[in-house]
Image (tube, grey):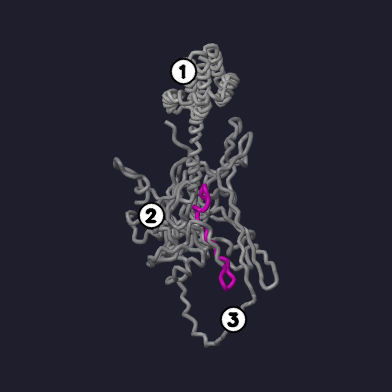
Amino acid sequence: TPPQKPAYPPPPPPPLTPPLVPQYPQKPAYPPPPPPPLTPPLVPQYPQKPAYPPPQPPPQTPPQVPQYPQKPAYPPPQPPPQTPPQVPQYPQKPSYPPPQPPPQTPLQVPQYPKKPAYPPPQPPPQTPPQVPQYPPKPSYPPPQPPPQTPPQVPQPDSFHTCEIAENYKIQCGAPFITAYDCNAINCCYDGRMCYYGKYVTLQCTKDGQFIVVVARDSTLPNIDLESLSFLGTGQLCSPVATTSAFAIYQFPVTDCGTVMTEEPGGIIYENRMTSLFEVAVGPYGSITRDSQFELHVQCKYVGTAVQALVIEVLVPPPPLPVADFGPLRVELRIGNGQCVTKGCIEDQVAYTSYYTDADYPVTKILRDPVYVEVHMLDRTDANIALTLGRCWANTNPIADYLPQWDLLIHGCPYRDDRYLTRLIPVDASSGVYYPSYYKRFEFQMFTFVSGGASDYTKKIPSDQPFTPFSEYVFVHCEVSICQITATDNCEPRCFRKRREISGSTKKFYREETTLISSKELIITQPISE
């Protein structure tokens, strides 16, 4: 039997296998741990180890029994799952089996703790913390940078400065200029012609001229071309031509208030163009709806170039014959046509007949329409037109006699009259051979008074008697002849802010005028029934 007791020491060798068990915990979650149970078949080899019993020192192995407490060392591998503090409780259970080590079955018990080794798979729960990492994926909103595309909204580039309607295009440069030369002078080229664009074009000519072309569409809101001016004034400082879309200026660099500055190697000419704006004044403030426009123009001439100049003196040709057409003959008449049929147009019927010399003085009631016609006599040239300058009324056949009241100014109705004079157009349907020889307008009859306020908008108090200054009214007009051209139809442009006359231009000079006057008109009181 003693040798049988040494047989007990052999069991300690199996504990040697347990040390391998801690290696398995290092491989947690690996199901392979089940194979270790195959090691028990090695137990039959233990009888072979009885050879060791002769060296009884092995009995000292019992001290190895304390090695079982080393099994608690297994918990150290458990630190990885520090999160489950309950894991250390499993080693407490193996503490119970130690009293049963005598039976071999306890050896199987250590195998059970191997199963607790499965808890290490609990680290996967650590993966859930990775789940919160998925929320960071919602950080994908950063792809929102694409909305940065809205900065493309600055599409005001869609304003194309060269998109000009065909009927508004104005030739820029020589007739057969190339596209390169056209761009060099700041103009637009469409393959057929060079023309001014929708902006302000400045050109400095070699002969010392400013050429400034201003487009109405160069500002928002559109600029009033009639309100532009330079530093100086004068006949040369006005546009040489205007249309509903452009105003063209051309004047020497030494005129219109231009300031000259000398610098080494050159001379600089500077001017400034500004626009007037209309101000509406109210009881508590003033406003405007017009664009404020200010443009600095500058031409610099460099004097470092050398130019060869050849002067050839030729005998001047004989002068052209002088043509004298004599005085301008015009006639002023008052129409007296009456509408006698239903649907007739009074403006047209009024000029079907006129008062004769025997009818004067003509009697009118206040506010009665007076139809005036001025026409040119003894002419057959269809390329000329009659134009009206100033028309006014007074109380004397002498045109300069005072008091006076304006009817037309520069061919347009006097705007300070509450009862505006009305221009009546004359065309081919008017039944005259040369419509451009005729000018017609209509005003409402009035009388001059004394004792009233100087301001026509102020009515005389009812307690003050109405004192007619004179019963007679005479009409006077300044007339002249205008040469009709492709760019000037000799028609006045009136009330520009209310309507636009497409393609028309303004003539900025007036030739010598002729004065024509009417005979007297008498004001009478209406007959009461």
Look at the numbered disc 1 and give the secondary structure of its residue.
helix
Q: Is there CB contact under 8 Å for labels 3 and 2? A: no
The segment highlighted magenta reads 204-222
- Quarter holding residue 68: top right
Q: Residue at x 52, y 26 (%)?
A: 52
422 over 124 or under it: above or below: below
Q: Which of labels 3 and 2 is toward the front?
A: 3
| Residue in the foreground of this view, choosing between 435 and 113 | 113
Q: Residue at x 50, y 53 (%)?
A: 216
* Residue that mark 2 sits on: 426
Label located before the other in sequence (3 or 1) = 1
Residue type, mark 3 in image = Gln
| Residue in the foreground of this view, choosing between 251 and 266 | 266
Q: Is residue 265 visible?
A: yes
Residue type, mark 1 in image = Gln
In the picture provided, is 458 more to the left or to the right than 521? right
* Residue that mark 3 sits on: 307
* Residue that mark 1 sits on: 108
Spatial separation of the CA atoms under disc 3 and disc 2: 56 Å
In the picture provided, is 433 more to the left or to the right than 512? left
